[in-house]
Amino acid sequence: MKKIFFILLVTGVLSLLLPSLIAQTKPVKIYLSVDMEGIWGVVHGNQVSADSPEYAAGRRWMVEDVNAVINGLLEAGVQEIVVNDSHGSMRNIPAHELNPKVTLISGSPKPLSMMEGIDESFSGVIFVGYHARAGSYASILDHTISGAAVYAIKINGQEMPELGINAAIAGYYRVPVIMLTGDAETCRQAKSILGEKLVTVTVKEGVGRYAARMLPRELVLKKLIEGARDAVKKISEFKPFLPSPPYDFELQLHNSNQAELGALIPLVKRIEPRTLKFQTKDYLEGFKLLRVLIALAAAS
């Protein structure tokens, strides 16, 4: 009888501990979405434009920032890292200069754009080199997806920067954002949307839209490594971000003519001369329709 009781006791204890033991031994897989305006050193559009002689320097700073984050992740024991080049043509990161241990997604167009490759298998998401939403004060090259077309994007009534729009895509797959790097205002916006626990690394402080106070380079690289390590250590504390359905998308454009073609799409309403609105039950479907509307507006 004692032997049977002991077996039952051990079985019960194992049934309680096994799920947490499995969770602790699950390989950590991290996804990096990398933009360029929030990279250290960048203060002007010439530094992020392929047709400018200043672009080479921007690319070098970009891969240095990314590699620093990767080094921190590897030091923290991350087993798999996927990097998605997410700026402009999405062919900015020199593949041969990126840490050879990671997977790089490069080129465009991509179905999920800045979040291409994300799925349920990832443990966390890091946004590197991100920028603030259009109309932000003292933030380098602030805009939302398309500087030529978008005045503002609201989801369920809340104005969103790209970091919020993309965080919700990660949330759709039940993956939390654990870290963000960029200028001071971008880091502030990230915490206001994703929570104070989010690990942020400020690489520069905006003086205006085209001027910033750069933190010392060696200090920034050190902070990027430490931030990535810290984010992985606290990964269990982060929760996925996703607003509650149904999803009301509102797209405010710069000019009234930019809303004309989009208004012809079923489900899309033109509520003001330059504002389009629609509602979906599925966030990913809403995001894809939003991208179409922005592309039509930019083409106008």
Image (tube, grey):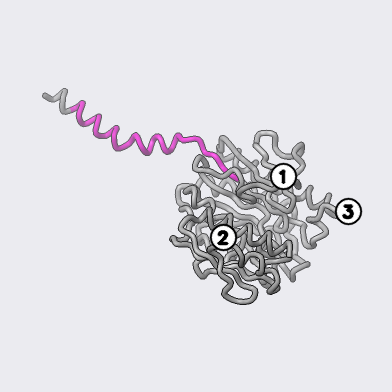
Is residue 53 depicted above or below 3 in this figure?
A: below
Q: Which mark is residue 53?
A: 3
Q: Secondary structure at mark 2?
A: helix
Dot 1 or dot 2: first in sequence order is: 1
Q: Where, by quadrant of the figure, is residue 244 drawn?
A: bottom left
Is residue 22 depicted above or below 194 in this figure?
A: above
Q: Are marks 2 and 3 in contact (CB under 8 Å)?
A: no
Amino acid beneath label 2: Gly
Dot 3 or dot 1: first in sequence order is: 3
Amino acid beneath label 3: Pro
Amino acid beneath label 1: Gly
**Magenta range:** 6-31
Q: Quadrant of the N terminus?
A: top left
11 drawn magenta: yes
Determine the residue located farthest toward the right in the rendered image.
53
Horizontal arrangement in the rendering, residue 243 relative to residue 266 (left or right): left
Q: Where, by quadrant of the figure, is residue 189 drawn?
A: bottom right
Residue holding disc 1: 107
Place of residue 300 in the rendered image (x, y in percent of width and height, measured from the top left): 73, 65
